Amino acid sequence: MKKYKPTSAGRRDGTVVEYKKKLTSSQSNPLKSLTKGKRSTGGRNSSGRITTHYRGGGNKRTYRLVDFKYDKKNVPAKVESVEYDPNRSGFIALISYLDGERRYILAPQQLKQGDTVEVSETAKIKAGNRLPLFAIPVGNYVYNVEINPGAGARLARSAGNHAEVVAQDSKYTTLKMPSTEIRKVMNNAWASIGTVSNEENRLVSIGKAGRARHMGLRPKTRGAAKNAVDHPHGGGEGKSPRGHRRQRTKQGRPTGKGQKTRSPKKHSNKLIVNRRKPGRLMGGKR
C-alpha cells in the first residue's frame, strides 16, 4: 500500500495499491483477442430507468474476457503475465495452454509469471489449480466456486476473498463463505485452490471526490435530505426523525442495522447451515 505526501488536500488521505510490485510489465496492454468493448450503463436498465443509483460517468474500460467456466481440463497451462483488470477488484492472469490456446483467469495470491496451473480431478492442491470439491481436503481455502456444476464460477470472486472447506458429506461439500455464512454446495462442482489476489484492495482510501468520479461513482444523497415523494426517510420540517422504526431503502424495503433482508422463500434456504452474522465484518452492529 502506498501513501502519498500531503502535497494537497486531495493527496492527504488517499492511498493506492503498488501495482508495479505485484504485476508484470504487460499490465497496460491486454491481449487484444481476449478483449471487447464495454458500454457504461450509468445504472440504467434496458428501459432507460435507473435501477442502481449513484452511478455514471467514469473512465472508459476495455472488458477482458475472463474464463470462469474452466472447460479445458487435463491440459497444463503456464502463466505468462499477471495483469490489472479495471472491471474487477482482483488481478487476472494470462495463461497459455500446451496446445497454444490463451485465456485470462482470476489470479490467486502468490501466483507469478512462469507458474503452472491445471484443471483436473487429479491436480495437486496448489494455488491456482482447479479441482471438484469432493477432491479438496477439509481446511483448504478455495475461490471461484461453482454453485451448479459446469455453469461457471459464482462464489468468492472479489479481491482477498476465499471460502473454507469445513466438511465433506455424501453429496455436498460444506463451505464457510466470506460473509461468515455456512452453506452446502454440490460436491461435483469445481473450485480453484487459494485466495483471490489483491488483498490490499479493502484498505484503499479513495481520498478525494474526483477519484471517485473517475471510477464511475456519483455523490450519494442521504434519504433524510430528500423530499417525502423521493424517499421514505424524506420530508418534514428541518431535521426530522425518519418517522418509522426501521431503516428503509428508496423502494421501502428494510436495510442496514443488521436487519435480515433475505427472501424467506428463497430456493437455496435449504442449503444454508448457518446464516451470516451481522457485525463489524458485515458493516452492522457488533
Image (cartoon, rainbow, N blue to C red):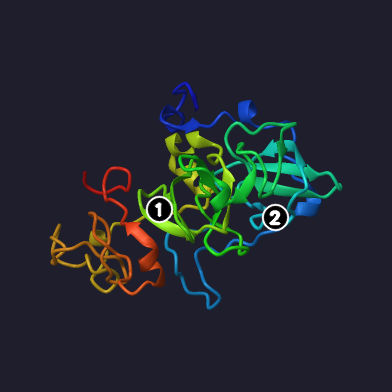
Sequence-wise, which precedes: disc 1 or disc 2?
2
Q: Amino acid at mark 1?
A: Pro
* Picture quadrant where residue 226 is located: bottom left
**Label 1 CA crowd tier, 10 Å (few <14, some 14–19, many 20+):** few
Within the image, what quadrant is residue 111 found in? top right
Numbered circle sitting on residue 219: 1
Looking at the rendered structure, the secondary structure element under dot 2 is loop
Q: Secondary structure at mark 1?
A: loop
Query: Residue flagged by tag 2: what amino acid is it?
Result: Leu
- 165 relative position to 28: left or right: left
Q: Residue at x 49, y 38 (%)?
A: 201
Q: Specify whether residue 78 is in view.
A: yes
Residue 2: x %, y % from top left: 51, 25
| In-front residue for pair 137/6 | 137
Quadrant (top left, top right, bottom left, bottom right) of the C terminus: top left
Residue at 57% across, 59% down: 188
Q: Look at the picture and state if 279 lies above or below 207.
A: below
Determine the CA span between mark 1 and mark 2. 30 Å
Q: Residue tagged by mark 2?
A: 65
Q: Position of residue 50 (x, y in %)?
A: 46, 70
